[in-house]
């Protein structure tokens, strides 16, 4: 059952719509007239909404989505066009995006339609990407005289490799969902009408898992991007050991041995 937006757990925002479906927090980008162009206030609101879900013990997993036509067509070009170096540096134009990368609970992107520039970077910053057959990915910044600025040159290259990333970023061409899947850029492709439902279904599946272990699993996988293999393996082993301090580890292992379903307490 979906809770109506606007109560204490789901405050109203101007550019994002927030709702809950049991333990799943759903955030929808909401500037449809401009294909969900990511203005600064939208990113601030998105970070506020996701941080609130991150702190809410009742929420175990999040879904981030747009609409049928666009997940998001990038940063807001109208907002940036007249700015100079001094402006973007002083105002730290993309600074608020850092808040998104600090979310500890899993975030699933449900992507339909255009997923371009900052929109693609936002999706790549999520943990799982469910793409509709209609999804079109791309880093078109080169066509407007800049380069990706919210992670595209780094995340795309790490996932797709130098040669795929280089072509995408130097030409700005759109990459259809099936091609993105072949590049390893999306978790799976589904019919457009099933995209959000599939993301929410998956979020519910993750929400059933022990929450502390889920957060540590996310942290461990993300560490694979940050460190050389030996340091990543060490980090993973230490997180693994630390889970033996949780009640959920005792419960999970005992339940297995006693052939019953575990009762997670998040402790
Ligand atoms: N910023 C601001 N407005 C945007 C926008 C953006 N990124 N993308 C689309 N819009 C607006 C259009 O200006 C248009 O507004 P009006 O109706 O007021 O004219 C409206 O959304 C609908 O767009 P189109 O008429 O262009 O729709 P289309 O179907 O003809 O084309 C599109 C769709 C190919 C996605 C095209 O809109 C487009 O190329 N958008 C820009 C994509 C882009 O360059 N993104 C990168 C931005 S820079 C960035 O993201 C930097 C970073 O790394 C953080």
Image (cartoon, rainbow, N blue to C red):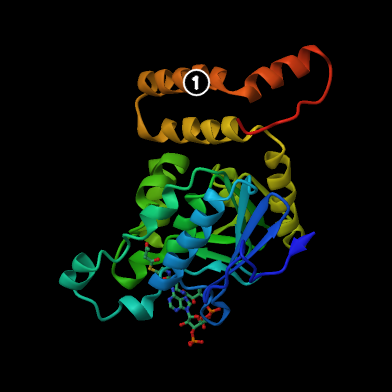
Residue 165: percent from left, percent from top: 41, 48
Residue 137: percent from left, percent from top: 53, 59
- Looking at the rendering, which quadrant does residue 157 occupy? top left
Relative to 159, residue 147 above or below: below
Image quadrant holding the C terminus, namely top right
Report the number of discs: 1
Image quadrant holding the N terminus, namely bottom right
- Left or right of 184 on screen, residue 146: left
Relative to 260, residue 157 above or below: below
Is the CB of the residue bearing disc 1 within 8 angstroms of ligand 1?
A: no
Q: Name the residue nearer the viewer: 150 or 6.
A: 6
Q: Which residue is mark 1?
A: 242
- Looking at the rendering, which quadrant does residue 60 occupy? top right
- Left or right of 215 on screen, residue 203: right
The residue located at (44%, 54%) in the rendering is 100
The answer to whether any part of residue 127 appears in the image is yes
The residue located at (41%, 35%) in the rendering is 225
Residue 195: percent from left, percent from top: 71, 57
Residue 135: percent from left, percent from top: 61, 61
The residue located at (68%, 47%) in the rendering is 203
Q: Name the residue nearer the viewer: 38 or 43.
A: 43
Q: Residues within 10 Å of mark 1 (few under 14, many from 20)?
A: few
Disc 1 element: helix
- Residue extending furthest toward the left: 86
């Amino acid at each position: 059952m979906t809770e109506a937006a606007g109560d204490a757990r789901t405050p109203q925002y101007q550019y994002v719509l927030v709702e809950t479906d049991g333990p799943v927090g759903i955030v929808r980008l909401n500037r449809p007239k401009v294909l969900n162009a990511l203005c600064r206030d939208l990113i601030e609101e998105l970070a506020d909404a996701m941080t609130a879900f991150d702190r809410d013990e009742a929420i175990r997993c999040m879904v981030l989505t747009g609409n049928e036509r666009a997940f998001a067509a990038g940063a807001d070009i109208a907002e940036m066009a007249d700015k100079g170096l001094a402006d973007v540096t002083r105002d730290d134009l993309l600074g608020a995006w850092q808040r998104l990368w600090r979310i500890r609970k899993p975030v699933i992107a449900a992507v339909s339609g255009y997923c371009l520039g900052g929109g693609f970077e936002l999706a790549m910053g999520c943990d799982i990407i469910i793409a509709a057959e209609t999804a079109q990915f791309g880093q078109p910044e080169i066509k407007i005289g800049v380069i990706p600025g919210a992670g595209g040159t780094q995340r795309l290259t790490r996932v797709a490799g130098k040669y795929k990333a280089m072509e995408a970023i130097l030409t700005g061409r759109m990459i259809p969902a099936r091609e993105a899947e072949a590049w390893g850029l999306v978790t799976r492709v589904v019919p457009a009408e099933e995209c959000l439902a599939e993301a929410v279904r998956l979020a519910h599946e993750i929400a059933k898992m022990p929450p502390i272990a889920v957060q540590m699993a996310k942290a461990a996988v993300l560490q694979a991007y940050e460190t050389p293999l030996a340091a990543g393996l060490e980090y993973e082993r230490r997180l693994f050991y630390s889970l033996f301090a949780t009640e959920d580890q005792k419960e999970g292992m005992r339940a297995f041995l006693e052939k019953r379903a575990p009762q997670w307490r998040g402790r």
